[in-house]
Image: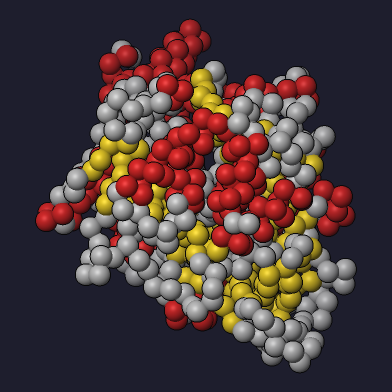
Amino acid sequence: MGLSQEITQVFSRYKGRAAVSHYVPPNSSITLTYGQLEERVRELAQYLSKQGMQPCDLVMCYMTKSVDLVVSILAIVLNGGTCCCFYSKQNPQYALKLFSMANPRFILLEENTLRSVKRQMERVEPTHLFPPCERYPEAGGTGGSIQSHNRAIYVFKYPSAKSDGGGGFQEVDSSSEKALWCLFTSGSTGSPKGVLISGEDLLRRAVTEIEDYELTDQDSLLSLLPFSFDVGLNQLLSCFLSGAHLVILNSWFPRDILTAVRSQNINGISGVPSIWTEALAYPKGPDFEQNTQALRYITVSGGDLSKNQLLQLRQYFRNVKIFKTYGQTETFRSSMLKPFDFERKMTSVGRPLKGTEVFVLNDKGEIAPPDTEGEIVHYGVGTMLGYLNDLEGTSEKLRKMKEPGSKAMKEGKWVFTGDRGRMDEEGYLYVLGREDGMIKTLGHRVYPKEIESCILEHEHVKNAAVVGIKDERKGQVIIAEVVSNGALNKQSLIVYLKERLPYYMVPGEINVVEYLPMTESGKIKYTTIKERYEERRFL
Amino acid sequence: MELHDIKEILRKIIGDIIASNGEPDEKPIEFGDDDSLIDGGYIESLGAVALIEECIRKFDIVIFPAELSLENFDTVNRMCQFIQSKLMENQQWA
């Protein structure tokens, strides 16, 4: 059974139950039941079909995270289209770039993004002005249940450059699985790439998450992450497939998160490191345990915290299960550290997920012996179909390979993650860093993460990023940007690091900054930091 | 400081933060005093950090973590109210 049939079944099974809420603290929220959600989804799906949407068409959503976005996503899925949404920070130029890369049949917009795209299109391509943009639902057709939420979805037929009517995109390979989703990688590593995912795989991912987090139709999950980010998307899908209630909150302020947990009886939160770093700096009130008593689990995904921060997090959420997950957009989730392993193995990212095989390969392409370093490769659930319109990039990232340790060629492909790591004797994976982020200095190979985690142990440091910048003398010079949580003295930090790190790992330059450049999913934008220093060097 | 002056400074700060997401020659993005800036996606969750830092610096006020919320920061008008009350606190202590 496909994803759309599964969703249809959930709609009818849970008709009267809350499906999705948009919560704006302290006390405003709108909620749709599964019945109401289905009604709106079907309305939009029919409308799109009437406008000429075909199964397999690529449809993009350029919208903020809202109930409307959920409706749009599900309508596209129901019509058998390929869905691609991205976060609506007001950056129309980036939006236009994605549009021309993906060449969608339709773009769904909301008032704000419509306005900004319109402005940009006028300037960039005067001939296109803004084509007939039709309001949804048509005048007078607004459903009673959603009137409080008076935003409209705008359906924009994208003026495709292709002469064949367009709206299509290059098939990735001859495999029978078709792409149901396109996620744009966050750009923390340069220019965006469209990662294509099959409906079958989305379903497998959701089923795995339901098992791991033990989701049931009694749960309410807090949605803090964008749906354009694989972790946020999978939370949405696994929530709906288990008949649970998704509560959208567009704020990462700890007070707002805690208010939501208390007032909406939240049972689970999927989070990224920056959310938890902020939370740790927030004083717990006397009623904290009582206010968070419904909370069963939280996740640290899309990056890691230092050991010190993990210990603090354990203390902060004393009665809550903590899951750590590791993966990248191309693999979704390779491994997971489960709560029962947390105390013992917290600096690892756990063991390969059910349905996946993960190996660390040395430079000869053999399995690296325990505790030795190599590239992490991934097989199984979570593997992308390929990159959108990029066969070359796809064949570099996805390769056929024999099962390590055997002679048999494996069906399907392996993802070469470009992440360096090691596996211990018990099969727990440790991630060292990106292959291309590795710093070569004074003849040594250093990963930014090793230095960052040492800096983060310092009591006056809230966040840190380390980059390597070309240097004639040293190969690369190490520069650290540090966010202080109060009274950080740069000199004392240098002394602190000198006591704890080998000489070649001590940054040559430390700058205290107010905040680090981040992607919308909370990852540090290393390229931005690097550019800053590289430019300076050539001045 | 009058509410009017606070608003003017705030609108400048917010304008700068929103513009820094785009290209330099981009036309300024319009926003109303009651538009939901964070929940409505004008400012991403992490951009809010920059906003707070600027407020602390420009108005010379102390903001406690417990005061950081959509309730105080989601719209220009709410921010104005909050900052005015902070400035009044400062005066009382001076």
The residue at the far left in this view is A127
Q: Is residue A134 left or right of residue A188?
A: left
Q: Can you say whether A483 is above or below B65 in the image?
A: below
Q: In this figure, which colouring scheme has been used for the structure?
A: secondary structure
Quadrant occupied by the N terminus of chain A: bottom right
Quadrant occupied by the C terminus of chain A: bottom left
Using the rendered view, name the quadrant where residue A68 is placed: top left
Q: Can you say whether A77 is above or below A409 in the image?
A: above
Q: Residue A481: percent from the left, percent from the top?
A: 53, 54
Residue located at (77% from left, 82% from top):
A368
Residue located at (55% from left, 64% from top):
A198
Q: Residue A173: percent from the left, percent from the top?
A: 49, 78
Q: Residue A25: percent from the left, percent from the top?
A: 54, 23
Question: Residue A455, can we see it?
Answer: no
Residue located at (43% from left, 69% from top):
A388
Q: Is residue A83 left or right of residue A204?
A: left
Residue located at (54% from left, 18% from top):
A27
Q: Can you say whether A469 is above or below A215 in the image?
A: below
Question: Residue A56, can we see it?
Answer: yes
In the image, A517 versus A84, the foreground residue is: A84
